[in-house]
Image (spheres, grey):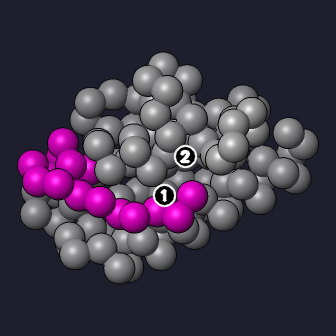
Amino acid sequence: MSQAEFEAAIERSLIAIEDALDDCEWDIDYERADAVLTLTLEDNGSQVILSRQTANRELWVAARSGGYHLAFDNSGTKPGWKCTTTGEDLPTLLDRVLTEQQGAAVALELGL
């Protein structure tokens, strides 16, 4: 994956997450500062942070349950970000960590 392809994939993903949060039934605020997207669950103030790691060409997710490194996987029928430790795709991982922190099922319905 070239640098330009990496940047485009990150940008598409972050925009999709922002759009999904706008449509989400939960009160989850977000703030984006260049390479970092911070999600704040208003019910309890906990945060999930997504950050672009350009040198590694990875997307990192920091949550209460831990830190997750995701690499872009083009090998399957549905290309996308996959966690290098759990094997989860980005939508599954994000729904899981948000659900854990919210204490109730969160489904962002990401179209990634």
* Amino acid type indicated by mark 2: Ser
Residue at the far top: name it.
Answer: 85
Magenta range: 98-112
Identify the residue shown where x is 38% and y is 79%.
Answer: 22
Q: Is residue 5 left or right of residue 21?
A: right
Q: Indicate the secondary structure of the residue bearing disc 1.
A: strand
The answer to whether mark 1 and mark 2 are in CB contact below 8 A is yes
Query: Is residue 111 shown in magenta?
Result: yes
- The percent coordinates of residue 15 (x first, y second) are 57, 69
Q: Which quarter of the rendered picture does the N terminus lie within?
A: top right
Residue at the far bottom: name it.
Answer: 23
Q: Is residue 68 left or right of residue 75?
A: left
88, above or below 112, in the image: above
How far apart marks 1 and 2 lie (CA) works out to: 6 Å
Q: For this rendering, which residue is in front, 75 or 4?
A: 75
Examine the image and state in which quarter residue 54 appears: top right
The residue tagged 2 is 51
Identify the residue shown where x is 37% and y is 71%.
Answer: 21
Q: Is residue 112 left or right of residue 110?
A: right
Q: Which mark is residue 106?
A: none
Query: Is residue 8 shown in magenta?
Result: no
Identify the residue shown where x is 66% and y is 64%.
Answer: 12
The residue tagged 1 is 37
- The percent coordinates of residue 77 (x first, y second) are 69, 43
